[in-house]
Image: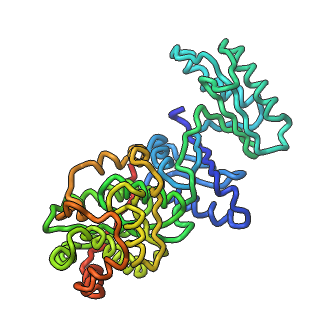
Amino acid sequence: MLDARHLLINYDEIALKGGNRRYFENRLQKNIRSALKDLGGSHLKPRFGRFLLRLGSETSLERVCSRLERIPGIALFSPCLSTSADLDSVKIAMDTVLEPLLESGEEPDHFAVVSRRANKELPFTSTEANEIIGKYVQEKTGWKVRLKKPQLPLYLFFVNNDCFLALDRARGLGGLPTGTTGKVACLLSGGIDSPVSTARIMKRGADAVFIHFHSHPHTTLASQEKVRDLAGQVVPPGHRVRLYMVPFAPTQNRIITECPARLRVILYRRYMVRAAEAIAHKEGARALVTGDSLGQVASQTLENLHTINAVATLPILRPLVGMHKAEIIRDAQQLGSFETSIEPHDDCCSYLMPPKPATRSTPEQLEAAEKNLDTESEIRELVENSTVEVVEGYLG
């Protein structure tokens, strides 16, 4: 099937959107075109609650598939051979699939024909198509039929007056198309959690601006390089995102000098939230997104999260809040960010980490500690000294 020149692309949640469905379909269509535009020669159009993608003669099917599986909103996609929607033509098309398998000796123990019929005016039902084509395949090959979990499923998709024959249905990310549910500001640290958190929120249709706080020159440039790499892995192909690099070391130095050591990390986080909010307002983002998981580290106890939230005026979304670390690692591995995330770097929150950080702080304690700092000036300095880059999703 490597010479297949058609793909059927299915979505799931969009089909439930009622009167807003067209808006989501149009955005997904735009995102797919953007992801594939450099490959050339492809044509995409809607077909009965799915999309049909016709590839150019020189377009790489493998590269197209590798990008489709990273586009939020796509539930399934199937590389297909195309023929007419009459069963004699389907039998001829089936021969082109069966003959290489018979010649190679790589024959399945059992198979099943699975038909989906969008055009209800065809002179046969899906069940009849399964029986007629299944009998043809069995007589030609001698293979056994197994309807439940067959080793070789043969999919027939009848759309308008065409039939598309597929051997596989590859899974996409699902969710909603990026850019359909508003913009958020995602804090990226360079660790394991924040890229997974960002990917999850973008799969819910959110567009994003990225914010990274670094402690250079007290730490190396490694965290900044990692975040650029992670951002490219998280962003869907064909999509572009602004990345703010925020120099946090001067603020940290003042916190270390003026404030109690045990509150140091909570103070860092409160100032990060304030600066991220200022950037979010500048970018038109409606919420902040972090990689916090409840109780995972000292700053993520319920009391400390409450103390951090106390300085926020925008919602703080925490997609990982109820997840176990092993679950987050599994998601990072599936996302492809894990190997990058575990490369060593100096995280800004670990800079001069106190030996006994507070685990049960209160907003009142932190407000008292912050009286020694000019908060308004600190935030203005953080935002003004930030640099902005544009990151594009890796194409592959």
Q: Position of residue 386 (x, y in %)?
A: 27, 76
Residue under the point 40% across and 69% down: 209
Q: Quadrant of residue 371?
A: bottom left
Q: Quadrant of residue 224?
A: bottom left
Q: Position of residue 45 (x, y in %)?
A: 63, 55
Q: Position of residue 395 (x, y in %)?
A: 40, 52
Task: Please indicate whether residue 87 sits to the left or right of residue 330 in the image.
Answer: right
Number of dots carrying numbers: 0
Q: Is residue 82 above or below residue 235?
A: above
Q: Is residue 13 above or below residue 331?
A: below
Residue under the point 59% across and 23% down: 151
Residue under the point 68% across and 36% down: 83
Q: Position of residue 127 (x, y in %)?
A: 80, 31
Q: Quadrant of the N terminus?
A: top right
Task: Please indicate whether residue 294 sits to the left or right of residue 163 in the image.
Answer: left
Task: Please indicate whether residue 122 sits to the left or right of residue 222 in the image.
Answer: right
